[in-house]
Amino acid sequence: MERDDIIEYSLHAHHSEEDGKKIRKKIFFVTALLSIITAVEVAMGIIWGKSTLDPNGWAWASIKVAFIVMTLVKAGYIVMVFMHLGDERKSLRNVILIPYAIFILYLMFILLTESSFIHEVKNFIGWV
Amino acid sequence: MAGEATQAIDKAELWGGGRSPFSVSYGKMMMWFFLISDALTFGGFLTALGFARHHLADTWPITEEIFFHFPFTHAHLTLMYVALMTFILIISSVTMVLAVEAGHRMDKKGVIKWMLFTVLGGAIFLGSQAWEWATFINGSEYGAYVMQDGTMARLDIDEASQTMTLENLHTGQQITDQALIADIRENNQHIQGANLDRNEYGPQLYANFFFFITGFHGTHVLSGVIINLLILIRSIQGWYEKRGHYEMVEKVGLYWHFVDLVWVFVFTFFYLI
């Protein structure tokens, strides 16, 4: 039986040839951005390899932070533009991003705290 | 994108029932919910990797000393192969979003063309990963030795002069004292290659995480390629043209971009940091 009470939201997503041009332009901009960021990451990884830097020094720490920031920028563009989450309703965006962020931030906090403790205990009792 | 989601609709009407308050179809919302749960799995994997490498910081290997191989050459090309794989996946993500865009214009030919490129990109990525795994499993030519402090040192023998070098995979330091190397080869444990019960690169967990994280991601790529292929065949058959919209392309697109998104994080946290 054909149902007539279902709203076809996807039909609203259709766009014209001109809109398509604008959207494609944005896609190519994001492509270039993602490629450039990846190239910079690889270059940094090769130039300031972990063998050339003190693993406990500030230089390596700041490179690590730079890597994470660049990754988050890339992830943001993929989710917001390629996955069109930026075009969805704000309520859907929050339902997807906020619970995830809460869970993962907590997990990161607890695992890094615990592993630091385990590392200390291992050094203390001399177990490799 | 000019969808219903961009229109201002009164809150009371949006949440009043009889419609989706998010202005998305059931299928699309369920794809997002699935992606959240899948993202939690990968998030768990990557935070567990962080846990392992943090408490095994004294023996964890330097990735640049391991991933420098490139097909058809013996040159030392640090990280270049992984960078190439990352680039292949980004490009296939772009062709996917172009397929979605073509679908919004009801451009059947465009959808078919871009879906074909996406399937191809995914297949190339899988092939690259097979090569990467084979290289990782086989290990270096002469294997590595377990040092006193638990770190690994990889042996290299120069063919012409028969001089040996031991390179520590944790510190990057080289030992060139021939008598000392001969002594280490005599007394220390020798490991060749990597699998789930031995690992010539460092702690066993390092190899295990390599296989589980890249393997789990590769399985996602494989299923993504298969699903993309199915959607491609249905596009060619004209199912979506008849239906009046290409939302199925958009939904598999979400999954495919997610696979790319995960690789972005794997690339940073496994290979770079």
Image (cartoon, coloured by chain):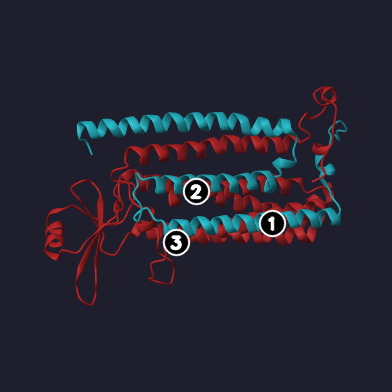
Chain colours: A cyan, B red
Three-letter residue code for mark 2: Phe
- Please tell me how crowded label 1 is: few (under 14), some (14-19), or many (20+) other residues with Cα within 10 Å: few
Residue B139 seen in this snapshot: yes
Q: Is residue A90 above or below residue B130?
A: above
- Marks 2/3 same chain: no
- Marks 1/3 same chain: no
Could you give the CA–CA distance between mark 1 and mark 2, rounded to whole angstroms?
A: 21 Å
| Quarter holding residue B236 | bottom right
Could you give the CA–CA distance between mark 2 and mark 3, rounded to whole angstroms?
A: 26 Å
Instruction: Specify which label sits upstream in the sequence, 1 or 2.
Output: 1
Going by the picture, which residue comes out furthest to the right? A4
| Quarter holding residue A13 | top right
Left or right side of B185 for B40: right
Q: How far across and how far down the image is residue A23, in percent?
A: 77, 53
- Marks 1/2 same chain: yes
Residue drawn at x 71%, y 38% is B28
Residue bearing mark 1:
A29
Labels 1 & 3 near each other (Cβ < 8 A): no
Three-letter residue code for mark 3: Trp
User: What's the chain of the residue with tag 2?
Assistant: A
Residue B131 is marked as: 3
Residue bearing mark 2:
A67
The local secondary structure at tag 2 comes to: helix
Q: How far across and how far down the image is residue B102, in percent?
A: 78, 55
